[in-house]
Amino acid sequence: MGLSMELEFSDDELRPFESLEGKLLVASKSLDGSCFERSLIYICAHDDKGALGIIINNKIGNFYIKDYVGNAYVKPALKNKKVSIMFGGPIDQDRLIILSITKEQEKNFEYFPAVTIYTECKQFLQDYASGNNKDKFLLAKGFAAWEPNQLEQEIEENSWLIAPANLDILFSQKVKNKWSKMVESLGVKSFLQLVNYTGNA
C-alpha cells in the first residue's frame, strides 16, 4: 500500500533567499518620524539569520583626528582635519564602527561591492593619522539590525527601496544631499513621486 503526502509551503519557504549584502537601502516616506527618516543604509551582512547595516547619511558631529589617536604621531597636514561621525543606527550607539575600502576593493567594487568593517577603530585611525593608511573611510556610532525575515517583510511593505551601492555616495563626507541624490538616481524626481513609486513596487 503506497503512502501519499501533500506538503504545503509558505511563500517565504518557496522563495529563494537573496542576500542584499553590499546593497543600499533607501528609506521611503513610510519611515518619516522614525530614526530611519530619509536614511541610506549600507547592508554589511545579510543571510537567513538576519541583517546588519550602517546608516551613512545621518551626521551627528565632527571630530579631529588628533583627538582620537592618543599620543600617536599625526601627520602635520592632518592635525586640524575634521572627520564626520554618522549615526549608524539605534543599536549599541556607543560603539564606533568604521567602513573602509582599499584601492584593490575600489577597482572591483562594481562587480563585488565589498568594504572592510572595523569595530576596533583606534589602530585604523592611528595609521590614517600617520599617513600610512590612505583608504577612504566612514565613521559611525551604532548600527541597525534585523531579525530573520524582518527586513524582507519591511521591503514588501515598501518601507525601503533597494539600490546598488555607489562609492561616491557611500564615502562622501557631504551628507546633506545623499538621500535625494540616490532617489534621483533611481529615477524618482520628487518626494511625492517616491511615495507613488514605492506604492506601485
Image (cartoon, grey):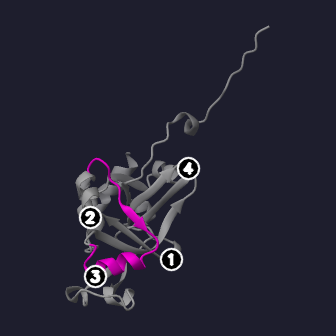
Q: Which mark is residue 149?
A: 4
Q: Is residue 144 above or below residue 25?
A: below
- CA gap between label 2 and label 1 equals 23 Å
Q: Nearer the viewer, mark 3 or mark 4?
A: 3
Q: Is residue 103 above or below residue 57?
A: above
The first of marks 1 and 3 along the sequence is 1
Q: Amino acid at mark 3?
A: Ser
Q: Amino acid at mark 4?
A: Asn
Q: Which residues are magenta?
A: 110-133
Q: Report the residue marked by disc 3.
A: 130
CB of mark 2 within 8 Å of CB of mark 3?
no
Residue at left offset 24%, top offset 90%: 80
**Cβ atoms at labels 2 and 1 below 8 Å apart:** no
Report the number of discs. 4
Q: Earlier in the sequence, mark 3 or mark 4?
A: 3
- Foreground tag (2 vs 3): 3
Q: Which residue is mark 2?
A: 169
Q: Mark 2 falls on what kind of element?
A: helix
Residue 148, x across and y down, in percent? 57, 51
Q: Earlier in the sequence, mark 2 or mark 3?
A: 3
